Amino acid sequence: MGEDLEKLKQRFSLLDYLRQQNWVARPAGHGSEFVGLCPLHRDTRPSFYVNARKNLFYCHGCGQGGDLLRFIQLSRQLSFRQSLAYLQQHEAASADPAAVLEQAAAFYQQQLDRYPEALHYLKQRGLHDLALIKELRIGYAPGGSLRRHLTAQGYSCDLLQRLGLLDSQGHDAFYRRVVFPCCQGGRVINLYGRSIAAAFAHRFLPGSKGGLYGWEQVQQCPEVILVEGLFDYAVLWQAGFRHVTCSLGTHLNTYQFQQRCDRPRTIYLTFDVDANGSGQQASQQLAHRLRARGISTRRVLLTDGHDPNSFFVQGGDARQFQSLLEAAQP
Ligand SMILES: [Zn+2]
């Protein structure tokens, strides 16, 4: 508890908190000191000092001083325990989900090298280029350690549950999964977890998956390859096809559809050729919708049972894939 409490306090800036409460201050002498009217007593001359570096306050008028928790106790007339609960709630309300997801993604990325089964799985899926794995920030969720890592940084279990990183019992939600962070505008907005065991192959955290994966890199390209899965995306990148984007499934949300229609371009639809034909059906429907919006489309026909990932895993190379692109029919 003691150590967690220290971390919780460290992550909160007393100065930021005071400013959120509309405290007006000016610098006092050295860089990290600020002074303003005391929020704790009727003050006529600024006598309330905050040391931003030490995260402490002291008032020369009423003689009160201490850290952020002490300030909350005094200003809200709460007990120590109540102040702690208040601070945690305040955090949950003001926490930036992207910052927490960023921490989770970084943690999973660090785990990847420590679990041979994860690297073995990537190899099985045709991914061997370590620089690429790093560039895409692919990580591994062994299960059972994210909670410890994030709560040690002071994040509450309640917040982690709301983001879906922990399940309703408070356990890590991702267990034995290879993890891809999904980013938009440079911020992590979701995590995709591919099970390396039998259970529920594909999972995202609750909340938006955002737009097309990797869209920002290809937005300017006159020709774009569209795939449905992140492993398809990754092997194409590895093979040198960088004008590729991923819809994270065959069903496109409205936003993804809009993104694709923002300018004239040719889209190479490279969906799975699965036994039940659902991938191709989705691809045909999408081609119709895109053509209706003036976007030219080509359907890349892989051989039966293949998706771009299995195409490369089973020995297909860049030159052969390029021929498939060239042979693609409207
Ligand atoms: Zn005072």
Image (tube, rainbow, N blue to C red):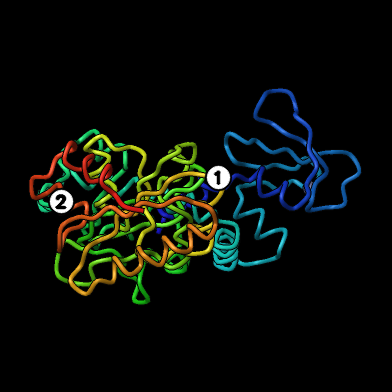
- Decide which of tag 1 and tag 2 comes sooner along the chain: 1
**Which of the numbered marks, if any, corresponds to residue 311?**
2
The residue to which callout 1 is attached is 263
Mark 1 belongs to which amino acid? Arg
**Camera-nearest residue between 299 and 17:** 299
Give the percent coordinates (x, y) of residue 66: 62, 47
Describe residue 3's horizontal placement relative to residue 145 as left or right.
right
Label 1, secondary structure: give it: loop
Label 2, secondary structure: give it: helix
Describe residue 314's horizontal placement relative to residue 319 as left or right.
left
Q: Quadrant of the N terminus?
A: bottom left
Q: Which residue corresponds to the image point at 35% horizontal and 46% vertical from the top-left?
A: 225
3D distance between C-alphas at marks 1 and 2: 30 Å
Q: Which residue corresponds to the image point at 66% horizontal and 42% vertical from the top-left?
A: 15
Spot the residue most to the top: 30
Give the percent coordinates (x, y) of residue 296: 45, 50
Judge whether 108 appears above or below 285 on screen: above
Give the percent coordinates (x, y) of residue 213: 40, 50
- Circle 1 packing at 10 Å, graded few (<14), some (14-19), many (20+), is some
**Camera-nearest residue between 232 and 201:** 232
Mark 2 belongs to which amino acid? Phe
Q: Which residue corresponds to the image point at 57% horizontal and 65% vertical from the top-left?
A: 89
Spot the residue most to the right: 44
**Camera-nearest residue between 298 and 108:** 298
Q: Quadrant of residue 29?
A: top right
The mark lying in front, picked from 1 and 2, is 1
Ligand 1 within 8 Å of disc 1? The answer is no
Give the percent coordinates (x, y) of residue 47: 81, 39
- Circle 2 packing at 10 Å, graded few (<14), some (14-19), many (20+), is some
